Image: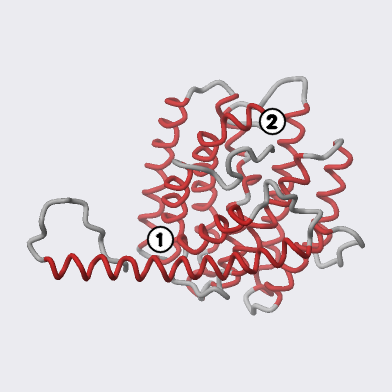
Amino acid sequence: MPATLPTSTEPSADPDATVRAALDAATEQGRICALAARGQRDLQTLVAEHPDLFPNPPVDPAMLGAVAMSTAFIAPWCTAAELRVANRASLWVTAEDWQVERGASAAAVDAIVTRCLAVADGSPPADGDQLGHLLARIRADLDAVAAFADHRERWREEVRRMLAADAREWRWRSDPGGPPTVEEYLDNADGFGATFVNVSHWIATGDAGTLARLDELTTASRQVQQIVRLVNDLASHDRDRATGDLNVLALGPNQADVRRLIGERLARCQRVLADLAGVCPRQAAYLSREIGFTTGFYRMTDFWGDGAGR
């Protein structure tokens, strides 16, 4: 575990220990940043191979670095190779979200969903379907993992849930009947993509204990996903208001209400994660770090950055 950082400017009772702690902490942080740098290079290669999916802006090197940094800090015990599926899945979520949000009609959105589900089922992507091609590469990465044979249906279900949630959100934005309730909005948080990424990562890297508890981990991940959805909304409200994207703050509650909602859901989630820590400590830590990293990151920026024009 990384050393604790000093929090006081007062002279230390043990100057040598202070220096060692600072050295150890910086060494660990440097190692994690190296994981992120390697992940970013892989993502830059994928973006260059799929130019129609990733316009710049908003998908610039800073955004790719932030995506790779998030996976590295959430799962710092992994190697760069072990983080590849999570990084690529996160990049695919970005592309899928962008494509569905800009669907010209319900039929166009439904066509995206149909094509992607066919690829998730094992069909080759159609010529020119860059979104399907990138998903096929992720599926090929998972096909190389022995655990995927037993868990491909679970992975396919996460693809389906995310696509269905994004299509539902597109309809909410286009529906003259009005927006969803806050609870309906949060129940649709699979569109955020975090659980799809998490399940992909666990199948790619999980040991027998992790794979045996995928039901519990996925349930906990959905709770985490709702929390990070709310944290994201607080950070991106101004841009979402300008672009017409759905945001919990457009559904009635104010910022204090949303922070209170985050606190209530976090308290419940922490109890779930504490129970999981007794039987699956590494993945309980993974989910805890996902909340922590996201909360810290969104206090200053978000993945799309300022002026992303979404």
Q: Which residue is mark 2?
A: 243
Where is 236 relative to 117, above or below? Answer: above
> Which amino acid, by three-letter code, is at mark 1?
Ala
- Percent across and percent down for residue 73 are 45, 61
> Which amino acid, by three-letter code, is at mark 2?
Thr
- Percent across and percent down for residue 76 are 44, 67
- Which residue is outermost to the right? 127
269 sits left or right of 232 in the view: left
Where is 277 relative to 8, above or below? Answer: below
Where is 111 relative to 128, above or below? Answer: above
Dividing the picture into quadrants, the one containing residue 237 is top right
Report the front residue among 187 and 259.
259
Report the front residue among 132 and 110.
132
Q: Which residue is mark 1?
A: 285
Secondary element type, mark 1 = helix
Q: Residue at x 67, y 62 (%)?
A: 155
> In front of the other: label 2 or label 1?
2
Dividing the picture into quadrants, the one containing residue 86 is bottom right
- Percent across and percent down for residue 60 are 65, 53
N-terminal of the pair, mark 2 or mark 1, is: 2
